[in-house]
Image (spheres, rainbow, N blue to C red):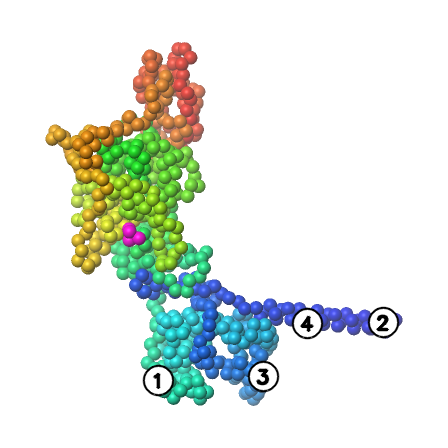
Amino acid sequence: MIRAGILGRKRRVLSGALLLVAAAAGFIWHRSTFIAPRPTAILSDRQGVFLGQIGRTDLGYGYWPVERVPERVSAAILALEDHRFWDHPGVDPLAVLRAARSNIGAARRVSGASTLAMQVARMQHPASRGYVAKTLEMATALAMTARYGRQAVLQQYLRLVPFGQSSHGIAHAARWYFDKPVDDLSWAEIAFLSAIPQAPAAMNPATESGCSRAVERGHRALARLHAQGVLSDDEFTHAEADIDQLAPERHPVRPVDTLHAVLLTEAMMAAQPPIEQMRSTIDIGIESRVAKLARDRLDALRAQGAQQVAVLVLDPRSAKVLALVGSSRYASADAGMIDYAVRPRSPGSTLKPFIYAQALDRGDIAPSTILVDDPDNGTGIDNADRRFLGPLLPRQALGNSRNVPAAKLIRVTGLMQTHWFLGSLGLHDGARTADRYGLTLAVGGLPTGLDRLVTAYDALANDGILKPLQWYDGQDLPEPRRVLSERTAREITAFLADPMARLPSFARMSSTEYPFPVAVKTGTSQGYRDAWVVAYSERYLVGVWIGRPDGRPMAGLSGATSAAMLAHDILTDLHGADSDGLADGEFRQPPGLRPMPLCAETGKPNDGRCDRVLSEFLQPSPDAAGSAIRPVSMVTGAVPAHLRISTPNNHSTFIRNPEMPASLSFLPLRLAAGAGIPQVVWYVDDKPLQLAAADETVRWKLSTGRHRIQARAPYGDSRSSAIEVTVE
């Protein structure tokens, strides 16, 4: 009985020991698995100037894979780090005995015995020095060598080993310090780099003392290689002379002005396969000049409440981003870390060119169509200056940035169609429906970012072809696609480039006028919270936003009096800095059209009796202008119906202007025709509002919520169909 108990205990002890051995073996096997940190990238500007590194891991930069180890590199590394590498199983017994004897004799640690495999184990699982950690490294190194083989261990070492300045791996170090691939390194450069891993901080090539120590140890590596017969006498002599003359690159710190661009590129690369070297489209020369101009202009506007600025500069033909200013200063107190170039804000009137472009492209209007800017317009939209200019050509209506004609055009083209078209340009992601914005699409009710805005404007500059912004070479981009006809894109560009068309709202020789052809559109959000401009010439496209991080109003700063001034500074500087001797090009005219003088009041050919004449691109046939006349009143509605409400539209959404007192916020109610009924009673939410003549416009004071509106004859059963409107 006692014997059986003893046997049982022995079995349990043996089973426990076997389990411990199995667990330890599994633990060591797991530790021996190669870890492959994601490679980071070295980012340079379009001329090769260093901008920064992106994709940093918790361990630093580098970690480029080493597909094939050049024999010269392996010989130099092993000569210094592990010269019996090909003979031991991952742990060098001779080195262990030598280190133990030295350490015991000195009564302290004076020598190590780490092989390359042990160093890989330590780099993959860093731990404080000690006998337990060293035992784990040895066991891991043995398992790693048995599992993968010596060649693979050497490759893993050359991927992870630190070379100072957060650089890891021989491939990254070769590019970082000598701007060349590993295969192109000279013997002197190989010896220099091989010296660094023993003490990367002490041999940091960025410091004079560190560089001297690395050179000194590199001489030892060359001597060993020569003694081993790896280097011939001539090779040794030349390498000894070369290593003293080496000048490894000392990279500047990441330029502050490009920080937002670097971070944006890094974010775009997060979901893509790693690229070891990247060339940005950013031009550091342009970037620096634009950033300084932006800061100077913003500083001059701070007294009026401006706190932040964002700028994007593109090559309009390629859509390559040449400069990004995400804020005035990244470390500024006014939330400078936020990249305002990609922050959605109310764009004011900057969406109007696309409303006109769509109407022209669809044939809803022609360049000679007369649009009416009037107070009794039935849209619930008012002009910013509370004035009305009467009949206008599209060129004038857009040039003067009139709200009323733009809102009418949305009704002509269709709210849902306009919303879809703006989405096709990338100005919104479709998360909210058209009803959410209503006719406020014409005045900045749809938030968008500066990056989206300049992308859409680039389609105008590119003859109707929409191209995604390009931030770096080799970027995986969708194919360009046509969003507007060539003719329409050039017509809108001509509208925006005509300083005469901006009169009387914008004075001549102001921030929107240039000594060379530039198409300009400004925008100001409600309460002067955001000031915008997009301006483009044949060479550059510039987008500017000025505002505040907290979204509070500025003191009367509009797009024309702030953002447009900065765009003027930038475009003037960029065109003045060009030294190719070429004259600034004119915008190309729409194909198949030629400029013709039109009477601004009628849209008909000038007969010599017009008070104001504008040149417009039209068909060259004599009757082209006359046949193109399509007053808005002729295309806004169907045949009048018996007691049919014409204003407002059914299912319209209106957003009250918070700057206007509630007592002055009205919505006009109007019938299409009375058809023999002299008077009607207007009902709102089934409650009588007012008895009025059938052709009279009734003003209903806006109140928040969803409302039902109907007109009824005071006698009999005649009544209109009820409509619903929403007021926010």
Return the residue at label 1.
238
Q: Position of residue 384 (x, y in %)?
A: 28, 35
> Secondary structure under badge 4?
helix
Distance, label 1 to label 3, CA atoms, is 36 Å
Q: Is residue 621 above or below residue 63?
A: above
Which residues fall within the magenta stretch?
A: 313-318
- Determine which of the numbered discs, if any, sits on residue 21 in the image: 4
> Does label 2 or label 3 sit earlier along the sequence?
2
- Quadrant in which the N terminus appears: bottom right
The mark lying in front, picked from 1 and 3, is 1
Distance, label 4 to label 3, CA atoms, is 23 Å
Return the residue at label 3.
93
In the rendered structure, which amino acid carries the disc numbered 1?
Answer: His
Pick the front one: 76 or 427: 76
- Quadrant in which the C terminus appears: top left
> Does label 4 or label 1 sit earlier along the sequence?
4
Can residue 390 be seen here? The reply is: no
Q: Position of residue 399 (x, y in %)?
A: 23, 39
The mark lying in front, picked from 4 and 1, is 1
